[in-house]
Every structure is written in structure tokens, then in C-alpha cells.
């Protein structure tokens, strides 16, 4: 499904269902140099169980053209504009990694547009190590290796995948590799320079879920717990997974989202 | 843009470790350390909602062993890990893997450009069988890059070759042909049966898809028939605008657009959800188990295969009754330098040679061998011999045979794991017998 957001076409995967602008709606926001397809095992299910789903490609990612937004704040403004273009008054915003910052920032800036907030693999701030920033800035393939390796639990290299026949490292690295040159570097920089307004975070009054991977190498579990403590009434769920919970623990994450968002019967 | 590797990537498991572990966790139900053989056609749904969600691809999991099976999935994931792909599909045979790749990418009117130096079974499929279904192939000399370019047409949907040709043992210039594929918006599929991921990884050399006959070195003991198809996940199906099977709604799966569903794994998704579902050439769990047993020792076996082959090639090349030996390890081979670049650990345990005395000498030679088994296979622990012109490639006319580098007296050897001195002794005796009138 294509919308026009801030003057440019914007792609959103609707979970294999025709798009209807109605509530309850969920916007899924991907992480650095990824696209909507990271939510494959959550978005399609929820779209077929009573939710309007928009798994978006941020500008300059996947099928959405345009310049990459250079700050988390600009990405949050883009999400708010997307909701307007899609004819939605409000939506649950579910974000992973960089997308979790975008989701949180959208809620901080536009609280009336966000119905519920789910932060998957998160941390505030989200500082990125110098070697990772440097490799991405140089477009060195090592940057893709870092994202794939640290983006999963160490055990993933030598374990069965929950998705039959899929090699999670390879799938993650290939998806990053399809992003345009410079996108990974820009996204990592946006994460690294994001300054959370913790006073606003503490004042947030929204149902919030924080999904933590107990074997997360990129945003360690303790960082997720720390952020959850700052958000009033935040519900925490700990999954036996690394940073890429959507593919490492797809069923457990879906269950957590269903319980949090409210399970609707199939239409 | 700087693509040089100036930064150090995180440490990852070595191929030897992946060969033993990748794709498998101890069995959650029993704690079994070895890969359990899930000899079950179907898998129980925990509830009606999950059943519907599994059928509609809303959640991952096993439904029916034609589509996926836990034992087969271990093999698929292990091969994807070894090749550096996004995933894999195991098939009933190597032929089934090739067929699955072709029918996933194209239908009637589709065109393939293939190396002329192919396994006879692949040649049969492309030359004789698929034209009946509207898919045609232009065969080109493997080494002639201009011929590859010239043969590409608007309806071309795939370039195809073997990493090391069988039986002529010519080396495919994967980086150059992958570049030609990329320039023309079509993928390159490489059959890497002869090299295996232990000697080279076609995806890392630029290929987009890779397939294997698992019957050969992967399983390694000549006990199973199987194939594997691995997707590198790097080809941009949407940008090429040539693959509606992957980028347009598919009526056969509720209008699913595979490239929307999975940006990096669209090819495998369609191959599984249509190709395995409808053509049904899936791998049996017992077969997957046996191939996995083979792969665990692949890193140990391949160097031995290759070392013994070098010794045999050297012996044959010095023998006065041998006209020519074809193996890239020899300086006389036209691909010697290319092989050294692409396969520094050696490139093949297959070699072929021309015996003096033509067809009759060839027959006497094969019948005098005692250690080598005369049969139609390669990549066994046991050394094998065959006369391609009268067996694997018998449907090819003399011109096609010559294009594939096969003469009437060509003998192909697959060097096994026996002691190389014993193999050389057997070959020496048989050559002596072949030269007696």
C-alpha cells in the first residue's frame, strides 16, 4: 500500500489485507537499515485478527523513496504525518531498536496520536559503539557483519531457527545489504545522537510494553529494564532471544503483543 | 564509496563448526544431541487459530512434511549457514533443486543461458524437456564471457553454470559471469556440487543462487539422493522488473506478493509455497539425516579428496599412455590461474583424461580396474570411474559432447578416500592392460 507522506510516496505493508482506515490500528517501525519485512511474523497475524496494520518502510528504506531522515525526531514527525495520510486518528506504535526510539519519540511529541506503545529491543539513550559507526560510515561490509552478529543472540549461529529453512544471520545481513549506501550510517548516527527528554518520558501516560531479549547483545536486557522503570505502568516481557526478537522468538513476541494490544477475534 | 574491508568484523564460527552445529539445537522434547529423524508426515496444531495462522503464513512452523520438516530444516539451515545465504530448501534430488529454481523464476517463454559444460542430467532437462513447457536454453562455452553476454535476450531469466564443470573440469568464472548477470538484471545460479562450501562459496563470489546435488560430496557416501537450493538474498527482484512470480500478487496464495512479504527471502518463499507445495519434490527426513551425517565430516573429507586427486592427476599426466589430463591443478589446464584464485584450497576431486587407443582402450581400462567402481555417480568415499560419452552424456551428439569438453575416449574419475598410493597402483595396472592388443 502506498501513501503520500511529506510529499513523497511511502510504502506500508498491510499484512496481506486490503487497507481500511479504521481502528484499532498498529504501525510497525523497523530498525536501522531494515524494512517492514522484519515484522513478517507479527504483522500478518495481527492484520488477520482484527487490526489495521501498517508495517512501514521509513523514507529511504525498502520501498519508500526520499531522503533518509537524519534524526529520530524527524522520523517521529514522519510517522505522525503518515497517520494523517492514512486517515488514522491514532494507532498503536510498535518499534524495534531504532524504531523503538521513533515510536517513543512519536508518543512524546504526539501523545494523542498514539493509542499504545510497544518498544522491542530498546534503550534510552541508544549509544552506538565507535567501531560500528566507523564501519558503517566507511560502507565497510564489516558493518553489516556487526549488525547481523550483534543483532542476534550469540547462540543463533549454531541453533535451529524458529522459521523452517531460514538462516537468521544471513537473512538479516542480506536485508541490511539491500539498503542504499549510507542508510546504515545515517540510522546509527540518528540512534547515537538521540537525546531522550527523560522528564517527558516520566510524564508519559500511555499503555506501554517493553519487550526485552535476555540475550540481547545490542541493547542489553538491563537497558530495556531501565527504560521501562522510567515509564509509568510499563509492562515488561522478557523473551529468550537476542536483539532480533521478531525472528528469534516470533511466537513469543506475537503472544506478548496480542496480550498487550488486546486479542481480537478474526473478522 | 569505499568497499574495502578496513574494519574488523565480529568473530563468527568457522565452517568446520557450522558443519557440525548450524541449524540444530538439542531436541527440545527429548534433549537428543544428534539430529532426531522426525519421520512424520504431519504436525499437530495446538489450536484452531494456530492451524489457520500456519496455513495463511501468519506464524512460522511445520504443517506437512512436503512443505517443511524439522529434520529437513536442520539441513536447510546448515547449508544456508555454510553458503552464507538467507535460507535454503532441500529437495528430492539435485535435479529437483534445479527444476525448483527454474520454475520459481520463469514460466512459458522464459529463457536460460547456461554453460555448455554441464552434468548430463541438467543438460537433458534444459535441452530436451523444458522446451516442451516453453522454457528454452542457449548453451554457451563456459569460458567465453562475450558468448554469455550475446546470448542474453529480453526474455532471459537466469544464467546457470557449474562451479567446476562435469566432466570437463573447467572452472566457471563466477565473479565475471555474476557481473554480467547483474548488468542484465537476471540472477546467476551456480551448481556447486563438485566444489561444496568447503572449497568455495559461490554466493560470496557474486552468484545469487546456489544449488547442490547432496547425493555427492555433501552426503559423501553414495547412500542417498537429494538436492539443496540456497538463496543469497541479494538479488533485487523488484528493481529488475522481470520476475512477476515474485513481485506481483499470486492468486495461488491469497494474492500474496512474495517480495513484499519478505524482501530478502522472496525467492525461497515462492519456491516453498508454490514449488514444493505443487511439484512436491521434497526431501525425506531420513535422507536429510543422512546428508547431515555426511556434512559433519565434510571439512575433513574434502581436503583428503582434493589431495589424493592432485597425486592422481600428477601420476596420469606423466604416464606415456595418457594423452591428456584435465584438472585445474595442472599448469597445462586453461583454468589453472582462475582455479588458484577462486579455489585456493583446491577445486575438485573430479578429473578426466584421454587414454591413448581411443574407445577400445577406454573399455579395457575400465574393465581392468579393481578399486575404482564403474558407475554413474561422483563424490563418494569410494573412487569411481565412468565413460561419459556412452553413459551420463549419451544423449548428446558429437558437437554437444565436444562443446562440453568430452571426447569419445574421455574417462572421468571421482577420487575417493582410499589411500592414494592404492588408487595409483590400480590405475597403473589398468592402463597397462588397456594398452595390450
Image: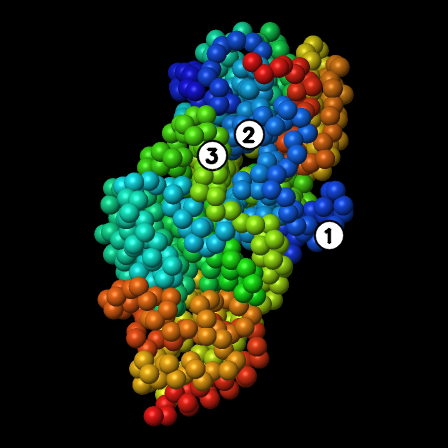
Q: Residue at x 54, y 42 (%)?
A: B66
Q: Sort mark 3 into few (<14), some (14-19) or many (20+) by Cα contacts within 10 Å.
A: many
Q: Could one spot residue B275 in this view of the protein?
A: yes
- The residue mark sitting in front, 2 or 3, is 2
Q: Earlier in the sequence, mark 2 or mark 3?
A: 2
Quarter of the image for the N terminus of chain B: give it: top left
Q: Earlier in the sequence, mark 2 or mark 1?
A: 1
Outermost residue, front side: B41
Q: Residue at x 64, y 47 (%)?
A: B39
Please give the residue where the numbered disc 3 appears in the rendered image.
Answer: B263
Q: Residue at x 73, y 42 (%)?
A: B28
- Disc ID at residue B33: 1
Q: Sort mark 1 into few (<14), some (14-19) or many (20+) by Cα contacts within 10 Å.
A: few
Where residue B21 sits: x, y (%)? 66, 53
Query: From what the image shows, is residue B53 above or below residue A142?
Result: above
Query: From what the image shows, is residue B424 above or below residue B208?
Result: below
Q: Is residue B30 left or right of residue A83?
A: right
- Disc ID at residue B55: 2
Q: Are marks 2 and 3 on the same chain?
A: yes
- The residue mark sitting in front, 2 or 1, is 2
Where residue A248 sits: x, y (%)? 64, 36
Q: Earlier in the sequence, mark 3 or mark 1?
A: 1
Q: Sort mark 2 into few (<14), some (14-19) or many (20+) by Cα contacts within 10 Å.
A: some
- The residue mark sitting in front, 3 or 1, is 1
Q: Say which element carries label 2.
A: helix
Amino acid at each position: 500500500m502506498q501513501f503520500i507522506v511529506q510529499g513523497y510516496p511511502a510504502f506500508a505493508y498491510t499484512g496481506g489485507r486490503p487497507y481500511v482506515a479504521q481502528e484499532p490500528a498498529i504501525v510497525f517501525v523497523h530498525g536501522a537499515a531494515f524494512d517492514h519485512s522484519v515484522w513478517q511474523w507479527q504483522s500478518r497475524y495481527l492484520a488477520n485478527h482484527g487490526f489495521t496494520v501498517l508495517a512501514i518502510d521509513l523514507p529511504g528504506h525498502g520501498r519508500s523513496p526520499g531522503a533518509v531522515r537524519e534524526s529520530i525526531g524527524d522520523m517521529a514527525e514522519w510517522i505522525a504525518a503518515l497517520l494523517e495520510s492514512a486517515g488514522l486518528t491514532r494507532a498503536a506504535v510498535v518499534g524495534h531498536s531504532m524504531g523503538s526510539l521513533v515510536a517513543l519519540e512519536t508518543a512524546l511529541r504526539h501523545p494523542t496520536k498514539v493509542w499504545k506503545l510497544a518498544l522491542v529491543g530498546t534503550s534510552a539513550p541508544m549509544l552506538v559503539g565507535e567501531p560500528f559507526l566507523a564501519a558503517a560510515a566507511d560502507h565497510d561490509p564489516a558493518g553489516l557483519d556487526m549488525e547481523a552478529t550483534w543483532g542476534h543472540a550469540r547462540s543463533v549461529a549454531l541453533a535451529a531457527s524458529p522459521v523452517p529453512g531460514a538462516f537468521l544471520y544471513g537473512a538479516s545481513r542480506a536485508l541490511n545489504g539491500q539498503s542504499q549506501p549510507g542508510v546504515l550510517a545515517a540510522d546509527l548516527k540518528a540512534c547515537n545522537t538521540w537525546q531522550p527528554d527523560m522528564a517527558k518520558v516520566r510524564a508519559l501516560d500511555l499503555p506501554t510494553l517493553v519487550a526485552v531479549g535476555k540475550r540481547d547483545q545490542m541493547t542489553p536486557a538491563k537497558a530495556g529494564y531501565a527504560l521501562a522503570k522510567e515509564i509509568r505502568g510499563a509492562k515488561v516481557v522478557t523473551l529468550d532471544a537476542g536483539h532480533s526478537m521478531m525472528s528469534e522468538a516470533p511466537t513469543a513476541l506475537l503472544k506478548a503483543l496480542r496480550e498487550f494490544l488486546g486479542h481480537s477475534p478474526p473478522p | 564509496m569505499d568497499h574495502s574491508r578496513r574494519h574488523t568484523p565480529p568473530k563468527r564460527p568457522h565452517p568446520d563448526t557450522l558443519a557440525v552445529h548450524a541449524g540444530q539445537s538439542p531436541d527440545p522434547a527429548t534433549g537428543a544431541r544428534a539430529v532426531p529423524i522426525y519421520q512424520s508426515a504431519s504436525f499437530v496444531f495446538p489450536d484452531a487459530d494456530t492451524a489457520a495462522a500456519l496455513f495463511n503464513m501468519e506464524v512460522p512452523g511445520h504443517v506437512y512434511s512436503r512443505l517443511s520438516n524439522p529434520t529437513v530444516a536442520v539441513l536447510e539451515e546448515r547449508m544456508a549457514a555454510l553458503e552464507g545465504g538467507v535460507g535454503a530448501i532441500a529437495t528430492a534430488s539435485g535435479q529437483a533443486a534445479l527444476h525448483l529454481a527454474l520454475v520459481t523464476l520463469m514460466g512459458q517463454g522464459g529463457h536460460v543461458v547456461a554453460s555448455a559444460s554441464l552434468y548430463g542430467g541438467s543438460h537433458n532437462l534444459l535441452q530436451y524437456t523444458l522446451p516442451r513447457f516453453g522454457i528454452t536454453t542457449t548453451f554457451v562455452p563456459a569460458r567465453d564471457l562475450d558468448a554469455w553476454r550475446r546470448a542474453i535476450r529480453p526474455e532471459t531469466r537466469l544464467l546457470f553454470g557449474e562451479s567446476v564443470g562435469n566432466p570437463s573440469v573447467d572452472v566457471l568464472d563466477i565473479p565475471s559471469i555474476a557481473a554480467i548477470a547483474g548488468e542484465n538484471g537476471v540472477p546467476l545460479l551456480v551448481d556447486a556440487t563438485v566444489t561444496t562450501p568447503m572449497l568455495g562459496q559461490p554466493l560470496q563470489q557474486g552468484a545469487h543462487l546456489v544449488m547442490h546435488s547432496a547425493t555427492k560430496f555433501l552426503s559423501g557416501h553414495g547412500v542417498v539422493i537429494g538436492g539443496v537450493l540456497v538463496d543469497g538474498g541479494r538479488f533485487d527482484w523488484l528493481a529488475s522488473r522481470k520476475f512477476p512470480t515474485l513481485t506481483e500478487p499470486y492468486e495461488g496464495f491469497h494474492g500474496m506478493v512474495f517480495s513484499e512479504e519478505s524482501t530478502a527471502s522472496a525467492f525461497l518463499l515462492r519456491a516453498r509455497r508454490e514449488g514444493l507445495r505443487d511439484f512436491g519434490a521434497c526431501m525425506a527426513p531420513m535422507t536429510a539425516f543422512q546428508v547431515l551425517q555426511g556434512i559433519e565430516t565434510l571439512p575433513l573429507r574434502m581436503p583428503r579428496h582434493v589431495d589424493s586427486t592432485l597425486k592422481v592427476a600428477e601420476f596420469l599426466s606423466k604416464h606415456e599412455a595418457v594423452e591428456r589430463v584435465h584438472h585445474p591443478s595442472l599448469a597445462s589446464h586453461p583454468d589453472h590461474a582462475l582455479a588458484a584464485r577462486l579455489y585456493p584450497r583446491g577445486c575438485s576431486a573430479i578429473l578426466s583424461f584421454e587414454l591413448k587407443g581411443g574407445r577400445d582402450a577406454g573399455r579395457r581400462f575400465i574393465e581392468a580396474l579393481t578399486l575404482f567402481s564403474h558407475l554413474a555417480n561422483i563424490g563418494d568415499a569410494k573412487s569411481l570411474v565412468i565413460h561419459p560419452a556412452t553413459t551420463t552424456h549419451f544423449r548428446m551428439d558429437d558437437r554437444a559432447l565436444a562443446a562440453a569438453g568430452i571426447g569419445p575416449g574421455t574417462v572421468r574419475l571421482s577420487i575417493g578416500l582410499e589411500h592414494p598410493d592404492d588408487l595409483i597402483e590400480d590405475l597403473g595396472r589398468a592402463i597397462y592392460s588397456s594398452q595390450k592388443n
